[in-house]
Image (tube, grey):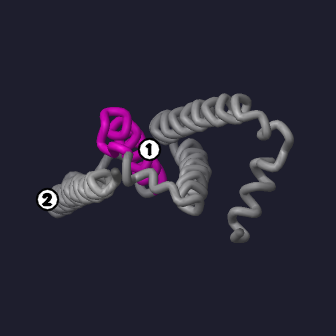
């Protein structure tokens, strides 16, 4: 067992007698998933709103919220990966809720950037700035399209492998 998994067992108190009852364990896992989603959505919403309504102070607070949100998300994914569960192998990433979360995240990042870089002042609107925005947005859209294509290809390969395994079973 790795140091990460040992630490996760201690932090999550996974060796408690509570987890011996399978129903309790399943219900607690579902409750934890709901709690994590509430944490995730309220964090993203707060981080998206704070820089725009509270200026620089809100931007620093939003940045802190996003760091904690990112840490919790990465820890969750890493724990699953360390236990041989690849969330991305079976999950549909670009569902409406995923797009909404990405949108909130980007609104928060934009608010943080505007508040900390410009002190909340409006964007500079010279042609070079607009060219940079358009170039950056185009690059992000191309990367997103590439990620979606990569994920679809990965899903097709995984399903083909599963079908091949199923065909071999008696």
Query: Left or right: where does residue 40 sit relative to residue 13?
Result: left
Q: Looking at the picture, how far across and down is residue 126, in whole percent?
A: 18, 57
Magenta span: chief secondary structure:
helix
> Residue 107 lies in magenta, yes or no?
yes
User: Which mark is on residue 25?
Assistant: none
Residue bearing the label numbered 2: 127
Label 1, on which residue?
A: 108
Q: Position of residue 129 (x, y in %)?
A: 21, 60
Q: Percent position (x, y) of residue 97?
A: 37, 34
Membership of 7 in magenta stretch:
no
Q: Name the quarter where the N terminus is drawn.
A: bottom right
The stretch in magenta equals 91-116
* Residue at 61% from the left image edge and 32% from the top image edge: 30
* Residue 165 visible to the viewer: yes
Q: Is residue 154 above or below residue 19?
A: below
Disc 2 versus disc 1: distance between alpha carbons? 25 Å
């Amino acid at each position: 067992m790795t140091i990460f998994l040992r630490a996760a067992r201690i932090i999550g108190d996974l060796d408690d007698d509570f987890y011996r009852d399978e129903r309790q364990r399943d219900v607690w896992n579902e409750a934890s998933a709901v709690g994590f989603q509430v944490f995730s959505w309220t964090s993203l919403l707060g981080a998206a709103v704070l820089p725009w309504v509270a200026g620089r102070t809100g931007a620093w607070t939003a940045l802190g919220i996003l760091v904690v949100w990112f840490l919790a998300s990465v820890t969750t994914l890493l724990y699953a990966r360390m236990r041989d569960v690849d969330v991305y192998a079976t999950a549909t990433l670009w569902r409406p809720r995923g797009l909404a979360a990405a949108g909130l995240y980007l609104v928060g990042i934009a608010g943080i950037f505007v508040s900390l870089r410009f002190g909340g002042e409006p964007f500079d609107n010279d042609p070079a700035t607009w060219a940079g925005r358009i170039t950056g947005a185009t690059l992000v859209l191309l990367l997103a399209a590439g990620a979606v294509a990569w994920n679809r290809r990965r899903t097709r390969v995984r399903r083909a492998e599963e079908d091949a395994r199923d065909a071999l079973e008696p």
